Amino acid sequence: MRAPIKLAALYGLPAALTIGAFSIGHLSISPETSPLNPPNVEAINEAASEQDAEEPSVDDTELAEGNILSEPDFQYYPYPSTVIGNIPGSNKLFSFEIAVSIFETPLSASNLMSALEEREPQLRPVILDQTVDLTEEALLSKEGRSNLAELIKASINNSLIRWGYEPFIHSVEITSFIVT
């Protein structure tokens, strides 16, 4: 007989205390308005008319274009791996890192960047192919690095076309560059 009383006290008492605490808390909260009363329609209409007077109206073409939430801007995607190679005809090595820029709304750019992340293993050899015949002079000159960035941009966009995407890379920036 004692065992069932101990079990009831052990399991029942904490449950009863928890339910009691929640009941007291629930009863102590009073809503600002009754959920059964209809809202004040006149006050809502007045607030809406004041807001319309302060803000310009939204055109249907703007809604269709999606320009309401954000304007297109440059979004940058740092390429995750460093490009390393030999300079032909010498014992020197070069390494550089790149970032690509996309001119889109943040939401669209996020989707496009995820496409780049998915294709990153396929893009690595495309980028390396552009560095095969580079000379030391081309790598050390500002114009040579600019030409390399344009070649990488064109090759990535060509690969994107081949994979069924619109070419969306606006520019390629060389963010880090070392010749050793």
Image (cartoon, rainbow, N blue to C red):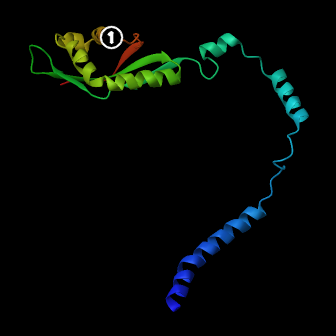
Residue 49 placement (x, y as % from top left): 86, 25
Q: Is residue 177 visible?
A: no
- Which residue is the extreme one toward the front? 1
Give the amino acid at mark 1: Ser
- Is residue 2 or residue 60 the one in the foreground? 2
Residue occupying the point 64% across, 74% down:
17
Quadrant location of the C terminus in the rendered image: top left
Q: Position of residue 9 (x, y in %)?
A: 57, 82
Residue closest to the eye, 76 or 156: 156
Quadrant in the picture for residue 144: top left
* Residue 116 found in image quarter: top left
Q: Residue furthest right?
A: 42
The answer to which of 25 and 146 lies nearer the viewer is 25
Q: Is residue 67 left or right of residue 48?
A: left
Camera-nearest residue between 54 and 23: 23
In percent of width and height, residue 37 lies at 86, 45
In the rendered view, tell whether residue 41 sits above or below residue 134.
below
Residue 164 x %, y %: 36, 11
Q: Residues within 10 Å of mark 1 (few under 14, many from 20)?
A: some
Q: Give left or right: position of 105 versus 120.
A: right
| Side (left or right) of 1 relative to 21 | left
Q: Can the viewer see residue 36 in this picture?
A: yes
Q: Which residue is mark 1?
A: 146
Question: Residue at horizontal 72%, vertical 16%?
Answer: 58
In the rendered view, tell whether residue 40 sits above or below residue 28.
Answer: above
